[in-house]
Structures are given as C-alpha cells and as structure tokens.
Amino acid sequence: MNNSENQRNPISPNSFKAWIRLARIPFLTATIIPVILGAVIAWTSLGAFNPAYFALTLAGAMCLHLGTNIINDYFDFRSGCDAINTEALSPISGGSRVLLENLVKPQSAYFAALSFFGLATVIGTILSVIIGWWVLLLGGIGVISGYFYVTQLAPRGFGELIVGLNFGPLMVLGSYYVQTQQLAFAPFFASIPVGLLITAILWINEIPDYTADKAVGKKTLVVRVGRKRAADLYSFIVLGAYAWLVGMVILRQMPLVSLVVLFTLPLAVKAVKVARKHYEASRLMVAANLTTIQTQLFFGILMIVAYVLSYFLPL
C-alpha cells in the first residue's frame, strides 16, 4: 500500500475498525429484518413470542451472516479476484478490501469465519433440541451455502438464488418456526419480497465486479448475461418485490396495511433508472447501490410495522 493510500486509510492493522469493516457489520440489517419479520408474524397471527428463542434465533442468524461475509472475502482474496478489481466500490461492492490492504491476516479471517459458523451451529443445535429438527436443517443449509458461496455456488450461477432464499424464506420461516413450532404460508408469502430485495442488493453489487469476476472464472449470473441485461433484470427483481406484495394483498394473503411499503417505491424507481443508465460506469452506479440498500431497509421496516398495525387494526 502506497503513502497516499495510507493517508486515506487511517485504520490500523488488526484493529477493531478493521474487523468491523471485514465483517461488514452495517449489512447485518439484511439478517435482522427477516428474523424480526418472522417473529412478528408469529406473534400477530398466533400470539406466539418467546424472547429467549428470538434472541437465540437472531444471534444464530447474525453469526451465519458474519461467517459468510468473512469467508467470502477470504476466498475472493485467495482467488485474486479482489486484487484485479479496479472498479470496486468498497464497502458497497468488491468486498471489504481489508485482506488486500493487509489490515487483517488471511488465516485470522479464515479462523474467525469458522468460529462464527461454529457458534451458529451450536445455537442451532440448542434450538433444535428445544424446538425441533427443522431448526438444525434450516441452519445447516445456511452454514453450507455460506461457506461454499464463493467457491462453488456463485461460479455456477446459483449464488443470487441462494442468497435470496437464505435471506428471504429461510430466515423468515425459520424465525416463525422457532416461535410457533410449525410452518405456514403467511410468513412464506411475506418473505418473498424481502428475499427479492436482498437479491437485488447482491445483483447490483455484482455489476461493478463484472470484469474481475469474469477474469477469475467466477461466473455469476451477472457475468453470464452481461452488464446491460443484468441492469434490465435488476429492474425486474426490484419491481417484482412490489408486484408480489400488491398481488398478495389483493389475494388477501397479506394485510391491506402492507401497502404502506409503496412509500419506498420512489427510491426503488430512482435506483432502477440509475442502474439502467450507468451500468457501464461503476462510479456513477454508487447512487443505485446505496439506494437499493436504503430501499431494502425501509421496505423491511415498513413491512414489520404493517404487521404490527394489522394486529391492532385488522384490515
């Protein structure tokens, strides 16, 4: 790292700030929202809520997410993908760059990732003993897909689908199941738009990574379809979340008050316009990346609020 990079980066090697950046803590909202949503649906539909079970579920899911974030950085560093990525918009896309900047040793990152996966497994085992084997099954899917995401799933074009399933149906249904000891259609229907918007975040983050991913043989769906088609498909993914929610309200599978999430539609439209216009210019894509993250966050929060309101004002 040259002197100018050192001046721009005041983070000390192996410091707390370096680990926070490596783990990408702000992105934990992608886990927190679906876990809360599943628990809220359990409470509003069946009156079931156990604070201790919820805390364990949230802790386990966050450990899974942290382990996945760190192991992905580790494998991208090992493959050389991060090193050749000149279009990275860190921390938005291109990984955290912490290993590349020598702020954390690769072996330390790998051990940390395994530790988080181990903690998630322990928590999942405890819950499965108390609740049922479904918890361990869902958690096992999360651990396996998180570990093999970069090396096996993303290169084969399955990464986006797996991320959408993990952060949508898997987490929402898992959280609901822990509280109720049963599965149901209500949390599944609610989980689809959540999963789609998480997929949208990953999808748009992969557009600036296109050249680097392609160079190392990481054949994500974005690499397979090209930047322009990826920008078009991104639009369908984002707007599909809204279409699904409206459809479920019309079919009375989600409460009418869920339409409050339409207040976030202008954000989504803004992100779509930027992505379709600037898909070849990574720096100009920053606005679309950040707006997608904001859309997912506010959409999720409003969904949770909507289900709480539906309990007191059934519509």
Image (cartoon, grey):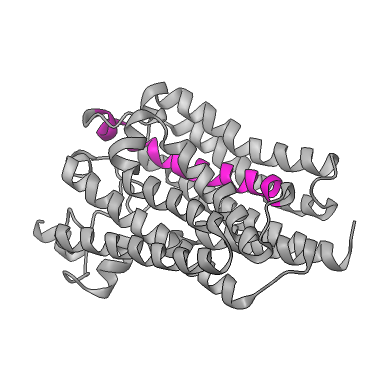
**Camera-side residue: 5 or 39?**
39
Q: Position of residue 86 (x, y in %)?
A: 23, 40
The stretch in magenta equals: 187-214
**Camera-side residue: 266 or 246?**
246
Please identify the dominant SS of the magenta region.
Answer: helix
Which residue is rendered at x = 28% and y = 71% of the image? Answer: 17
Q: Is residue 291 visible?
A: no
**Residue at the outermost left position:** 2
Placement of the C terminus among the 4 image quadrants = bottom right
Q: Position of residue 234 (x, y in %)?
A: 53, 33
Describe residue 31's horizontal placement relative to residue 173 as left or right: left
Q: Quadrant of residue 176?
A: bottom right
- Counting labels gives 0
Residue 209 is covered by the magenta coloring = yes
Residue 33 is covered by the magenta coloring = no
Describe residue 177's horizontal placement relative to residue 186 as left or right: left
Q: Position of residue 150 (x, y in %)?
A: 31, 41
Which residue is rendered at x = 47% and y = 23% of the image? Answer: 229
Which residue is rendered at x = 27% and y = 28% of the image? Answer: 214
Vertical side of 216 occupied by 258: above or below: below
Describe residue 89's horizontal placement relative to residue 111 as left or right: right
Which residue is rendered at x = 55% and y = 42% of the image? Answer: 271
Q: Quadrant of residue 243?
A: top right
